[in-house]
Image (cartoon, helix red, strand yellow):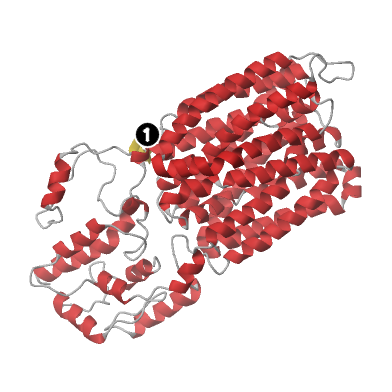
Amino acid sequence: MPPQTQEALTTMSSDLQEPLLNVGSECEPTQTSTEEVPSSPNDTTTTNDDNNNNNTATDVIEKDIVLPACCCMKEPRRVNHNVLLNLVLCVVYGISGSLWNGTAYAAYLKKIARGKNGPLGDVEAVQGLASLLTALPVGYVADKVGRAKVLRAGGVLLLITTAMQIFVLEWVGTEEDDNGEGGRYDATVALWIMGVIMAFFGIGDGLVNGPMMALYADSTPEGERSTFFNYLFVCYMVASACGPLVSIILFQTLGDVWDLWHLRLVIYIGLGIEIFNAVLMLFFDDRKALDEGEENSASSEGDDEGCNEDENDRDNHRTTGDSSPSSAEIMSQSSAPDTELLQRQKWIPYIVFSQGLIFAVGSGMTVKFFPLFFKDEVGMSPSQVQIIYCIVPIVMSIASTLCTKLASSGFGRVQAMLLYSVAGVLLLYSMVFFKKYLDVHPVLLVPIYILRTTLMNASYPIQESILMDFVPREERARWKSLDSVASFGWCGSAAFGGWLADKYDYTYTFLITAILQTIGIAVWCLLLPLVPRTEGSRTIEENGDNNNEANTNSETNTNSLVPYNGYSSLAEEEVAEMERSLGVPVSADSDGLTEPLLSSASTRD
């Protein structure tokens, strides 16, 4: 093969293969290196203007943290700074939250409220209202001035709020009256103060759910976000199991009773760990997020903005006597994107938000009261209830991993979430319609609750990945802050659920929750014609049919490129000129330029 032809083939092959090999970077050969990579003799992409700009910034920001080799990793591994910090924060956040803001805090509030469920729902509603009022401003500011600056302010706020909560718990004390309820203070004043403090925690939750998640999405490549969000979810869930485990040890060691002293001790430990959350929030860095080209490394040239550097590379890699376009450029120019579908896909964030809001309103009526349900209706001890909440996160982590693998296998993200949600709602209906039987056999409520909670929450990673994939990068913090609006629905319905539980029983709240979540499933079905089964793709493709058709066409057409996944056919004269310039048929399997690679690249448009 002539050297010029070999060089041209190598150039075109590298244009297709490098984005596949370098997952985290489409624009740069090595995104994390702190040393400048020397240019090859043929690389003329650096202009004089670029040289002038580079003279002012000689230091390249190191975006990765190198993890040393250990028993679970044979070699050192690089992880993005913000990704690793998010994972660590989720672990610490899960441990602290499960200790103080779970079963122990719910039981503590019911104690100081003289055994009523209503005040617990009211405090939750105040927390949600604070998130609602501050979520959108916080998200807007984070999109404008940077996520890291807002997170640092949130870390300071979290530190102050934690100190306030500890002070109030110390003021309330542990004295109880003859009925085993708090007795030496004004319950109304204590609950009002608790509500104000929880409002500040609500603002902090909005910071974690908004800017922090947006920065996490900015630091992960498109097409792999389901996997990365699953890592985040698993870290949080496993850590959430540690809180109940510590509570079990404390209750078994100090006394397995529902009194203010034991409950406050558990809360104190959880609040102490919150201090580490505040410190971690100070170290996020917007500069260490992936660049636009790096983030969209799985996207084709026609998606979003692309990378100008890659385009310049391709132009300058051509020989001076070769004016014919590359195959990737011809495919891009001849492609006809489904503009109508792309216009409809703009509704995806609104559908995801609406479904989440409906689910949140329904779940808020029951979730906070499940510990009290097991305590009052089933008659479980504190340790027994904590065992349930220790098992749930572990099972949920396994289920979320299976859900992510199912979605990535070709089943589809929307389809996987529908499967899990329908099964979870059916289990909640069973708790309503088989109440009499379950009252006689209360032990069956435990596996039903564990499976129901697992199925309803295990699809969180793929839900987040869908939202982040179809939201512009510069608006992600605002959209994630809208989760706080859903949180308000969650907390607001908790107040209504507390009233229902006092007036009737917990079964009424279970039924209303199941009905609302059924409506939410119907809303989620609207995504079926909009979200591709293949993550990272922008078009709806019939995977099996298109692959079979592509294989058939590649066998019968040896002298022309065959369109895949919506690509229109190439003009014969364009193909002929490509063949003349390269010296070989462009559809031949030579030197890595294969039709399967072209087919794979086309699915990104």
Return the residue nearer the eye: 591 or 98.
98
25 vs 545: above or below: above
133 vs 4: above or below: above
Q: Residues within 10 Å of mark 1 (few under 14, many from 20)?
A: few
The quadrant the N terminus occupies is: bottom left
The location of residue 296, given as percent across then percent down, is 36, 55
Return the residue nearer the eye: 205 or 559.
205
Would you name the residue on which mark 1 appears? 69
257 vs 55: above or below: above
Residue at (74%, 16%) from the top-left corner? 261
SS at mark 1 in the image = loop
The location of residue 455, given as percent across then percent down, is 67, 51
The location of residue 291, given as percent across then percent down, is 33, 48
The image shows a total of numbered marks equal to: 1
Residue at (50%, 73%) from the top-left corner? 542
391 left or right of 534 in image: right
The quadrant the C terminus occupies is: bottom left
Residue 114 lies in quadrant: top right
Residue 63 lies in quadrant: top left
221 vs 597: above or below: above
200 left or right of 9 in image: right
Identify the amino acid type marked 1: Ala
User: Is residue 119 visible in this depiction of the protein?
Assistant: yes
User: Is residue 281 visible in this depiction of the protein?
Assistant: no
The location of residue 34, given as percent across then percent down, is 24, 38
